[in-house]
């Protein structure tokens, strides 16, 4: 190695050393000027979505909560004329007669995180087979462990169940207890007195 | 380098009068006079041109015990460079601080100038008419008679004197350490404005001279494939007919007319590449004012980089004076001199990386670290197998890439669908998938939005703040931490790179163009990339962003992929026109 190239290497090494010094001191100085990250400071708490009562969304894959804490046996009254569904107290059964149907309310959620309460029908094994009811019950059973999409097939007279072929991940369950969800979904639509306008209407009372 | 806490008595207010060398825009400054006022001692320095050029350093302290105060300090630092003076240790730029204080305000009674800042704080200032008169005198250049010299020095001193009440009123609310960091960035800006970008002046001159003829030829040539121009004018009815024949669905306005704005053409030409030439033609005819480009007598493009001018704190140079502000195909004018090379270095998927680091979304961090976040997103969404590559699944990758970019631009499903050329439902599905896969990021973003609108203020990690006004677009607000911290990152990188003695020609949004002798460019790129990585780690608490570099050696040109075809087309027309001119001259 010639003397000149050795000198060049030495100079380059010195240059690198001085560069390293400059950068280290500048870097540590710059780092010391960084403000604490406050972006994650709580800016608000988003309230959970309130559920509605109805059928599972036919356009979305859904799951049904399998836990007993999210099953609620009750009487439901379907007022087709006004497009309303009422939740009735058991003591109102005598006033409502066959208009009240015993069902189990279940919690469902679709893959966009929208919660819904749905009515699981009681299957009367002694009665004539109702394909609508049994296929819907079947869909709910499957939805406890799989993402399913449920759509009425009018020609076949039953619900058509499509199981997702993709892993859609874990469902995003609401964290409210079932009682709160039911109160939210049926707010103003609970029949718990013989003087409820619906009972008065079916009894011809004004 | 940075005095952590300083007092008014440590400050030296400073102003220069200057003009571009020889009066030609694009040249570095020719210093005319300077006035400095040492507030602590009350001493004034009033020095005219010849004396200034004799000084090897400023006649006042610039070490760590003092703070140089100026308004738009990059101009003062450019004068330091022109005089060959060493740079000050501490700079307080009241322009940057005034911008920071008022950033987001939709109206400032006197604008952003020194006079505007004085007006904002209710301080007396010199009449604007007098200012214009003195500016004209400075621009005229030497020789100056005794009276003119005295007037210029007095005028210069009036600005220096105006800085005293301004700094007095602003200082108590200034976040000093970070203000000095912003001040320090002015040295890097001055270095970039002095270096400039090398331009092929011969081609530039030809383009300016023959532009009218080139435009006619361009329309004829490009329009041959579309038939939408008549007598050199774009006709929307002809374009509608073309779209029918080509079977291209086109967005319309509320009144049913074709949308013909720049963004629509940009999106649609991405979905239908057959339209790219037409889009470039329209872009070039609408925007090109070639003669406005600032090119100095040494063939370098230099102009004000207008630091801190955008809401995010980014530089905002003129779109007509700055070569990177022109249509992309014109970047072909950028050409290193013989023996030299330039390199374009940009952070890889910078915004995605910043979003991942700030939100600490594990999926997003993993996607960034994979090296190809777009493909990683497609994998995380289950749209492609885990062993997919960008070659095996280019279409899926592109869809997920466009989705990531759409979320960064705050684009809705309709615009994304237009860009992808897919039904809107597909775009919705992709955007939903982004929210699902990157749920932590979206929760973070929701939280940030709530906090921002609660306090009406949001700040970067180095103190650039935004006062949130009611009319601010919520999507821009959500994107502010990514955009404005990206601007901070660029400033940190420029400071580090400039300290290493690497020549930066220009900042280009979130990228940098550097220059070095051909045999040193590889090392310069390594050093610059190291600084950029360091800057990202400083900003993001240790998370390092990678960068990509493209080296261009003389005589190659700087080309953007999407611009080269149009550049080649224009060059072939230019050659043809010049040959015809030569033939005619021969006749």
Image: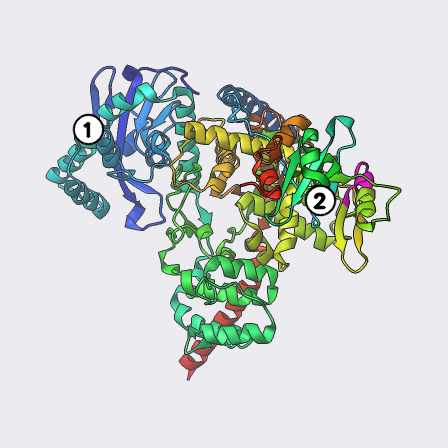
Per the image, the residue denoted by label 1 is B123
Task: Using the image, determine if residue B55 lies above or below residue A203.
Answer: above
Mark 1 falls within which chain?
B
Which picture quadrant has residue A14? top right
The secondary structure type at the circle numbered 2 is: loop
* Residue B227 drawn in magenta: no
Local packing at callout 1 (Cα closer than 10 Å; few below 14, some 14-19, many 20+) is some
Which picture quadrant has residue B286? bottom left
Q: What's the residue at 48%, 72% (across, down)?
A: B218
What residue range appears in magenta?
Answer: A140-148
Q: Is residue B331 visible?
A: yes
- Contact (CB < 8 A) between labels 2 and 1? no
Residue B30 place in picture, x, y as percent: 30, 41
For the C terminus of chain B, the image quarter is bottom left
Most extreme residue toward the left is B147
Q: Which mark is residue A196?
A: none
Most extreme residue toward the right is A126
Per the image, the residue denoted by label 2 is A56
For the N terminus of chain B, the image quarter is top left
Residue B536 place in picture, x, y as percent: 57, 31
């Amino acid at each position: 190695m010639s003397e000149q190239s050795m000198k060049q290497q030495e100079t380059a090494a010195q240059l690198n050393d001085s560069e390293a010094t400059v950068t280290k001191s500048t870097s540590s100085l710059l780092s010391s000027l960084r403000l604490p990250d406050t972006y994650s400071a709580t800016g608000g708490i988003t309230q959970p979505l309130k559920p509605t009562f109805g059928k599972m969304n036919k356009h979305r894959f859904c799951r049904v909560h399998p836990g007993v804490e999210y099953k609620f046996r009750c009487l439901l009254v379907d007022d087709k004329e006004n497009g309303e569904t009422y939740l009735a107290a058991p003591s109102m059964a005598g006033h409502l007669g066959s208009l009240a149907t015993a069902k189990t309310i279940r919690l469902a959620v679709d893959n966009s995180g929208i919660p819904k309460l749905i009515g699981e029908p009681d299957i009367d094994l002694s009665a004539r087979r109702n394909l609508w009811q049994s296929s819907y019950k079947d869909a709910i059973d499957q939805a406890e462990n799989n993402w399913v999409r449920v759509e009425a097939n009018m020609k076949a007279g039953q619900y058509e169940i499509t199981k997702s072929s993709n892993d859609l991940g874990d469902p995003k369950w609401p964290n409210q207890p079932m009682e709160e969800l039911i109160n939210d979904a049926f707010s103003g639509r609970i029949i718990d007195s013989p003087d409820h306008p619906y009972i008065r209407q079916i009894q011809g009372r004004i | 380098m940075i005095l952590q806490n300083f007092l008014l008595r440590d400050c030296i207010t400073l102003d220069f009068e200057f003009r571009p060398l020889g009066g030609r825009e694009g040249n570095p400054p020719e210093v005319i006079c300077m006035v400095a006022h040492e507030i602590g001692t009350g001493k004034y320095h009033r020095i005219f041109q010849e004396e200034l050029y004799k000084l090897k350093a400023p006649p006042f302290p610039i070490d760590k015990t003092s703070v140089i105060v100026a308004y738009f300090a990059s101009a003062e630092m450019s004068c330091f460079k022109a005089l060959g003076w060493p740079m000050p240790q501490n700079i307080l730029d009241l322009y940057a601080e005034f911008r920071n204080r008022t950033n987001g305000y939709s109206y400032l009674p006197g604008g952003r100038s020194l006079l505007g800042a004085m007006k904002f704080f209710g301080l007396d200032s010199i009449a604007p008419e007098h200012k214009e008169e003195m500016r004209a005198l400075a621009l005229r250049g030497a020789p100056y008679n005794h009276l003119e010299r005295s007037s210029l020095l007095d005028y210069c001193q009036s600005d220096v004197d105006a800085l005293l009440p301004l700094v007095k009123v602003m200082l108590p609310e200034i976040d000093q350490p970070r203000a000095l960091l912003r001040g320090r960035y002015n040295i890097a800006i001055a270095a970039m404005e002095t270096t400039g970008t090398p331009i092929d002046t011969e081609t530039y001159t030809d383009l300016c001279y023959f532009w009218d003829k080139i435009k006619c030829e361009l329309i004829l040539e490009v329009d041959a494939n579309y038939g939408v121009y008549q007598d050199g004018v774009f006709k929307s009815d002809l374009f509608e007919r073309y779209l029918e024949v080509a079977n291209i669905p086109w967005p319309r306005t509320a009144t049913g007319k074709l949308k013909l704005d720049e963004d629509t053409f940009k999106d649609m030409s991405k979905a239908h590449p057959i339209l790219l030439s037409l889009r470039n033609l329209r872009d070039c005819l609408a925007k090109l004012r070639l003669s406005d480009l600032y090119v100095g007598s040494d063939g370098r493009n230099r102009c004000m980089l207008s630091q801190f001018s955008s809401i995010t704190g980014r530089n905002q140079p003129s779109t007509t004076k700055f070569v990177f502000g022109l249509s992309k195909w014109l970047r072909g004018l950028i050409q290193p001199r013989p023996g030299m090379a330039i390199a374009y270095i940009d952070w890889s998927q910078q915004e995605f990386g910043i979003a991942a680091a700030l939100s600490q979304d594990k999926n997003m961090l993993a996607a960034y670290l994979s090296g190809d976040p777009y493909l990683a997103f497609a994998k995380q969404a289950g749209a492609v197998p885990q062993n997919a590559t960008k070659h095996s699944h280019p279409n899926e990758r592109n869809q997920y890439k466009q989705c990531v970019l759409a979320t960064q631009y705050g684009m809705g499903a309709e615009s994304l669908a237009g860009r992808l050329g897919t039904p809107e439902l597909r775009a919705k599905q992709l955007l939903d998938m982004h929210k699902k896969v990157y749920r932590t990021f979206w929760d973070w973003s929701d939280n940030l939005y709530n906090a921002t609108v609660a306090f009406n203020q949001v700040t970067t990690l180095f103190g650039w703040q935004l006062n949130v006004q009611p009319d601010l677009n919520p999507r821009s607000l959500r994107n502010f931490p990514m955009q404005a911290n990206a601007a901070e990152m660029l400033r940190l990188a420029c400071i580090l790179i400039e300290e290493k003695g690497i020549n930066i020609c220009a900042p280009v949004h979130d990228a940098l163009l550097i220059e070095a002798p051909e045999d040193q460019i590889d090392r310069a790129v390594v050093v610059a990339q190291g600084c950029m990585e360091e800057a990202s780690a400083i900003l993001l608490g240790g998370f390092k962003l990678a960068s990509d570099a493209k080296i261009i050696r003389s005589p190659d040109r700087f080309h953007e992929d999407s611009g080269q075809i149009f550049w080649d087309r224009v060059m072939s027309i230019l050659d043809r026109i010049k040959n015809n001119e030569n033939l005619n001259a021969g006749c």
